[in-house]
Image (cartoon, helix red, strand yellow):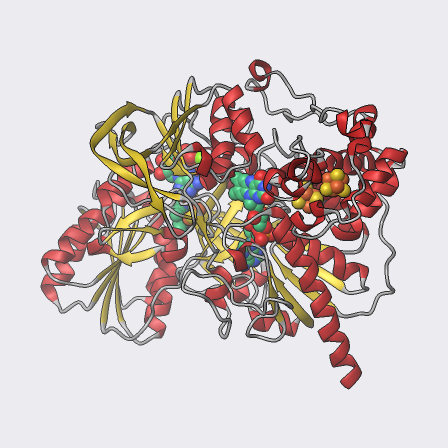
Amino acid sequence: KERTDIPRVKMKELDPAYRVTNREEVNCGLTPEQAVLEATRCLDCVEPLCMTGCPVGINIPKFIKNIERGDFREAARTLKETSALPAVCGRVCPQERQCESKCFYLQKLKKEPIAIGYLERFAADYEQASGEVALPDMKPDNGIKIAVVGSGPCGLSFAGDMAKLGYRVTVFEALHEIGGVLKYGIPEFRLPNRIVDVEIDSLRRMGVEFMTDCIVGKTLSYDDLHEMGFKGIMVASGAGLPRFMNIPGENLNGVMSSNEYLTRVNLMDAANPESDTPVYKGHRVAVIGGGNTAMDSVRTARRLGADRAMIVYRRSEAEMPARQEEVHHAKQEGVEFLTLHNPIEYIGDERGRVRQMKLQKMELGEPDASGRRSPVPIPGAIETIDVDEVIVSVGVSPNPLVPNAIEGLEVTPKGTIVVNADTLQSALPDIYAGGDIVRGGATVILAMGDGRRAAAAMHEALQKQQRSA
Amino acid sequence: MNKIVAKEHFSEKVVKLVVEAPLIARARKAGHFVIVRVGEKGERIPLTIAEADTQAGTITLVVQAVGKSSAKLCALNPGDYITDVVGPLGKATHIEHFGTVVCCGGGVGCAPLLPIVEAMKAAGNRVITVLAARTKELIILEEQMRKYSDEVIVMTDDGSYGHKGLVTQGVEEVIKREKVDLCVTIGPAVMMKFVALLTEKYHIPTVASLNTIMVDGTGMCGACRITVGGKTRFVCIDGPEFDAHQVDFDEMLMRLSSYKDVE
Ligand SMILES: Cc1cc2nc3c(=O)[nH]c(=O)nc-3n(C[C@H](O)[C@H](O)[C@H](O)COP(=O)(O)OP(=O)(O)OC[C@H]3O[C@@H](n4cnc5c(N)ncnc54)[C@H](O)[C@@H]3O)c2cc1C
Ligand SMILES: Cc1cc2nc3c(=O)[nH]c(=O)nc-3n(C[C@H](O)[C@H](O)[C@H](O)COP(=O)(O)OP(=O)(O)OC[C@H]3O[C@@H](n4cnc5c(N)ncnc54)[C@H](O)[C@@H]3O)c2cc1C
Ligand code: SF4
Ligand code: SF4
Ligand code: FES
Ligand SMILES: [Mg+2]
C-alpha cells in the first residue's frame, strides 16, 4: 500500500538564471537512489496500461522492476529489446501524452504517474556512462547489402536491426553530420550530442558504414544503388522542408525558419565565435508556433542573449503541441507567451531588416478537423510589437528530394511516401520508407519504431526471395 | 574529405581548383552546384561546378575570394583536402536547341556560365558570349569560352580590355544586330537585374542563375528563398535558374546583405 504514498520524483534541473547563459543540459538526470525509489512506486500492474501508451510497446514494468532491484544494466537491456534509442526517447518523448498518460496512478488513483521517461533515461544513461554499452548478439554476415537514406532516428534504428541480422548496411546522409534532427534540430540543452554519438558509435562497432555528404537522388541515383549491389533500400529522409505563412514581409532580413536558425546554431555551431557561420543574435525575438521546434528556437534565442523572447501562437496554451516540460522550462527561462495571437505582417526598415510585427488577436471558436478549438480573428484587434528577429516555426513538409528523384514511388498530395501500413514497403518492392517522410512531422519514437518494423519486414521479404531463388 | 589535385590563379582573388569528387563528376550536369565546407568550424558555401572530368573523377570550381569562407578555400593548395563537398545540387540548366543564345557573365559569374555555354553549343545553338568585369585582370575563362562560342564579346568598365562599358551594352549591341532567342545571365545580382530589364524591353526570354545565401542546399532551411513571380521559391531546389523577368532582384539584393552586420 505504501508504494502509492511515495511522491513522484523531481528531477534536478539547472537554475534558470544560470542555464540561459550556456547550453548545458537542463535536466540533470536521477541519482540511483532517486531512480530506485521512483521504481518502487510502480505497481507492476497485471495489465500494464502504460504499455498501451508507448508507440513501440516497451515492456515498462519489466524495465522498471529491474531498476527497483538495482539491476540497472538489465533494465537497459530490457529497453533495448524494443527501443534502439532509449537515452534519446527518455529525454524527448512526449511522455505526458504517451506512456505516462495511461499509467494506473493517473488513470485510477488520480495521482501523478510513474516518471517512466526519467527512469528510461536513467537506465540508458547508466549503461552509456559505464562505458560498456553492450552490443547485441549479431547474426553472422550474410553478405547482403542494404542502403539507408538518411541518418535520423528512423534510419539509425533500421540500420541497427539490419546489422544485427547480418546485413551489410550503409547509411547515406546528405549533411556532413550523422543524426538527422537529433543533431541539427534538437538543441544541446535538451539532447546533448554525445548521447546520440554513443548510439552512432555502437552502430559503427556493429559494422554499419556511414557515408556523409551523399544525397540519394543527387549524388547517387536509384540505379546507382542497384549497380552498387544494394538489395534493399530504406528511405528515412525526414520532413525537412520548412513551411512559411506567406504574409507580407516574411522575406525581410532577420525573418527565418526555425530550421535555418537551429541548423546555424546546432549543426554549424554559429554562436561560437570560432565558427565561420554567422547567426543573428536578436534582442527582441518572436518565434511563431507552439510546437517543440518553436520552444527549442525561443529557448535558444534566450541563450543567445535575447532580452525579450516571445512565443506567438494562434491558439491557446491548451492546444500547444509542444511537450509540457518544454513549455514549463521556457516559462522558467523568462519566455513570454503571446497565445491567441497570429502574425499578419512584418515591417522592415530602409535596409530591409525586420523591425516590427503586426499581430492579429484571436479567440477560440468551434473545434476544427484536428478536434482542437479553432482560432478566429477578433475584428480590429491588431497589435504592433517591436522585434529584430522572427523565427517561423509553423511546421515542415516532407523532404521532396527522394520522391522527386525516384520514379515510381507513390506520393500523397502532401508529399509523403505511400507505404503498406504493416510492412512499410513502398510501391517499389525494394524500397521501404518510414519516419517523417511517411508521417509528415511526427516524433522520434514513431520514427524509430518505423525503422524497426521496416527492418523486420524487409528481412522477411529478403529471406522469402532467397528461399525461392 | 576531397583532395585538391590542381590549382590555378586566374587573378589575385580568383582561383580555379580541380577537386577529386568522382561521384559528383559522374552525376553532374550544366547548372549544378556543390556545397563545400573548409575545416571543422567552416561554413557551408555554394559553388557552381564549372567543369567535370568523369575519367579523372574530378570537378572544377572557380572561386572568388569575397569573404572569410571563400578566402579560406582559395588559400588551399594541391594536396590539401576540402573537409566536405556535397552535390550535385540544384536543377540542371534546361538545354535545347533555341536558335541564338546570348550568354552573359559578370565577374566570377563567368565560372558557372562556362558549362552552360558548352552545353548550349553542343545542343546546336549559335552561342554569343558576353564576358564582363571591372578591369582586364578580372576577365576569366576567355579562352575556354571561345572554344564553345561562335563569338565572344569582352566588356570592361575601365576599357582596359575589349570594349569599354557595361555588360548590358554588349548584350544590347547583339540584340540590335540580330535575332536573339534566349539570354542566360549569371553574375552579381545588380548586373542580372539590369540585364533582365534590358531583355524585357526587347521581349527576349531570359534565364538568371541566382546566387543567394545558402546553408544546407537541400531545401531544408529556407535561407535561399526569393520571390519569383510573386511566389516564394527556394533557390537551392527550385533553382538556381529562374525566369529573370519574374525575379524580384531588389529583394534578392536586400537579402544578400543579410549577414553583413553579423560577420
Ligand atoms: C527542433 C525539433 C525539435 C523536435 N523535438 C522533438 C521532441 O522533443 N520529441 C519528439 O519525439 N520529436 C521531436 N521532433 C520531431 C522528431 O525529431 C522527428 O519526428 C524525427 O527526427 C524524424 O526522424 P526521421 O528519421 O524520420 O527524420 P530526420 O530526423 O529528419 O532525419 C532525416 C535525415 O535524412 C537526411 N536526408 C534527407 N534526404 C536525404 C537524401 N536524399 N539522401 C541522404 N540523406 C537525406 C537528412 O539530412 C536528415 O539527416 C523535433 C523536431 C525538430 C525539428
Ligand atoms: C548556386 C550558387 C552558385 C555559386 N557559385 C559560385 C562560384 O562558382 N564561384 C564563386 O566564387 N562564388 C559562387 N557563389 C557565391 C559564393 O557562394 C559566395 O561568394 C560565398 O558563399 C561567400 O562566402 P564568404 O564567407 O567568403 O563571404 P562573406 O563575407 O560571408 O559574404 C560575402 C557575400 O557573399 C554572399 N554569401 C555569404 N554567405 C553565403 C552563403 N553561405 N551562401 C551563399 N552566399 C553567401 C553574400 O552576398 C555576402 O554578402 C555561388 C552562390 C550560389 C548560391
Ligand atoms: S519510448 Fe517514449 S513512450 Fe515509450 S516508454 Fe519510453 S518514454 Fe514512454
Ligand atoms: S501503469 Fe504505471 S504503475 Fe502500472 S506498470 Fe505501468 S508504470 Fe507501473
Ligand atoms: S539552402 Fe537551405 S533551403 Fe536552400
Ligand atoms: Mg561567410
Q: Position of residue A371 (x, y in %)?
A: 43, 48
In the image, taking residue B162 as reference, residue B219 lies left or right, namely right
Q: Which residue is at a point 76% across and 29% down the rendered structure image?
A: A4
Q: Which quarter of the figure has residue B76?
A: top right
Residue B205 in view in this figure? yes
Q: Is residue A444 above or below residue A162?
A: above
Q: Which quarter of the figure has residue A255?
A: top left
Q: Position of residue B218 (x, y in %)?
A: 47, 52
Please state which of residues A395 and A200 is positioned toward the viewer in this rendering: A395
Q: Position of residue A71 (x, y in %)?
A: 89, 37
Q: Position of residue A338 (x, y in %)?
A: 37, 27
Q: Quadrant of the C terminus of chain B?
A: top left
In the image, taking residue A41 as reference, residue B224 lies left or right, namely left
Q: Is residue A169 above or below residue A322?
A: below
Q: Is residue A204 above or below residue A141?
A: above
Q: How many marks?
A: 0
Q: Which quarter of the figure has residue A165?
A: bottom right
Residue B13 in view in this figure? no
Please state which of residues A13 and B131 is positioned toward the viewer in this rendering: A13
Please state which of residues B241 and B144 is positioned toward the viewer in this rendering: B241
In the image, taking residue B110 as reference, residue A107 lies left or right, namely right
In the image, taking residue B26 as reference, residue A456 lies left or right, namely right
Q: Which residue is at a point 87% across and 65% down the rendered structure image?
A: A140
* Furthest-top residue in this view: A17
Q: Which residue is at a point 15% across and 61% down the rendered structure image?
A: B174
Q: Where ligand 3 lies, by image quadrant?
A: top right
